[in-house]
Amino acid sequence: MLDFFIKRLIISFGYIANYGYSDASGDYYISIDTDKCNACAKCVDVCPKNVYEIVTDDYDDQVAKVRDTVAKDLKYVCGPCKPVHGAADPPCVLCCATAAIVHSW
């Protein structure tokens, strides 16, 4: 019974999956709101560096995820899509119709 309430509590407040790292130059994270993600795979298609994949989460839902092989190199892997000046969003953020993807830098 307690498991039911814990799962219900997690689902009702949502879950943000954070992928990335911090170093002396800053914080480099991609956050994916798994409640908003509808697994449309547009982020997978638009990313030239193959950062995203669609996986089944712990609740048997299909969601986007940052590949484990690039999570510790996001600053460099995502660098070409990040604008040098201004606050423009990268293609993966722009293509996400549900606004599930956020970059921290």
Image: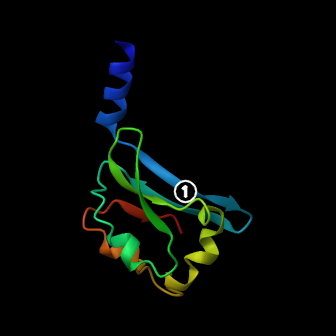
Instruction: Looking at the picture, tell me which residue is in the foreground, 87 or 7.
Output: 7
Quadrant of res 71? bottom right
Give me the residue at 38% from left, 23% from top.
6
Up-down: is 104 above or below 9?
A: below
Residue 93 drawn at (x, y percent): 37, 71
Question: Is 31 above or below relative to 90?
Answer: above
Q: Which of 54 and 31 is in front in this view?
A: 54
Residue position for label 1 = 19
Which residue is at a point 49% across and 83% down the rendered structure image? 81
Type of amino acid under label 1: Tyr
- Quadrant in the rendering for residue 96: bottom left
The C terminus, quarter of image: bottom right
Residue 38 image point, x, y percent: 27, 57
Residue sitting at x 32%, y 35% = 11
Q: Which residue lies furthest to the top in this view?
A: 1
* In the image, residue 99 above or below residue 17: below
- Answer left or right for 96 relative to 89: left
What quarter of the picture does the N terminus occupy?
top left
Q: Which colour scheme is used?
A: rainbow
Residue at the location (42% across, 48% down)?
A: 16
- Return the x and y of residue 76 as percentages of the image width and height: 63, 77
Measured as percent of width and height from the top left, residue 5 is found at: 33, 20
Q: Is residue 103 left or right of residue 62?
A: right
Q: Which secondary structure lies at badge 1?
A: strand
In the displayed structure, 3 sits above or below 99; it is above
Judge left or right: residue 35 versus residue 103.
Answer: left
